[in-house]
Amino acid sequence: MIYNKNSLPKETIVSNPKMEIEGMSWAVFWEDEGLPTPSLNLTRAFVYVIHYRTFLIVGNKNETGNYGPKYFNKLMFKLAKVYFPDWIGFNKGRCSYNPELGNRVLRIQKVAEWKLNKMFDNE
């Protein structure tokens, strides 16, 4: 992370950024956050950050498990805040419990899980 310090966007130019799901960690991110970046190392490190942030948004309703131990995800979240304090992904609205947004996240995760299961069922 240190090599990419302060390299992520601090504000958005997108009026209604699309929420996306990251691979098999089921973590969500917004298209205007600068993820994935050309630096694979930075993107992989942020899987833990956005997974913990997803947990914060959803609260304890998240049934999809953890990508790494929860304490490690929280540690990476705090570390990222040191190196990217002004990152748009740390805006309060994207890092706080929100029942409406949390339910949306859970629906997105269910659809992603359904698509994954369908893919395996077709094999």
Image (cartoon, grey):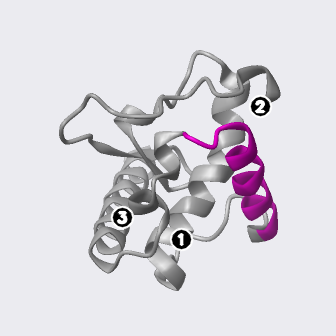
* Residue for badge 2: 1
- Mark 3 vs mark 2: in front: 2
* Residue for badge 1: 56
Question: Which portion, as a residue range, is magenta?
Answer: 71-86
Q: Amino acid at mark 2?
A: Met
Q: Position of residue 65 (x, y in %)?
A: 62, 71
Task: Determine the CA span between mark 3 and mark 1.
Answer: 11 Å
Q: Position of residue 57 (x, y in %)?
A: 45, 69
Quick one: 13 or 121, which is closer to the camera?
A: 13
**Mark 3 and mark 1 residues within 8 Å of each other at the beta carbon:** no
Quick one: 84 or 112, which is closer to the camera?
A: 84
The answer to whether residue 119 is left or right of residue 38 is left
Q: Amino acid at mark 3?
A: Val
* Residue for badge 3: 105
Q: Is residue 69 magenta?
A: no
The answer to whether residue 40 is left or right of residue 22 is right
Q: Is residue 79 magenta?
A: yes
Q: Which residue is painted at 80% across and 69% down in the image?
A: 71
Task: Determine the CA span between mark 3 and mark 2.
Answer: 26 Å
The label number, if any, that marks residue 65 in the structure image: none
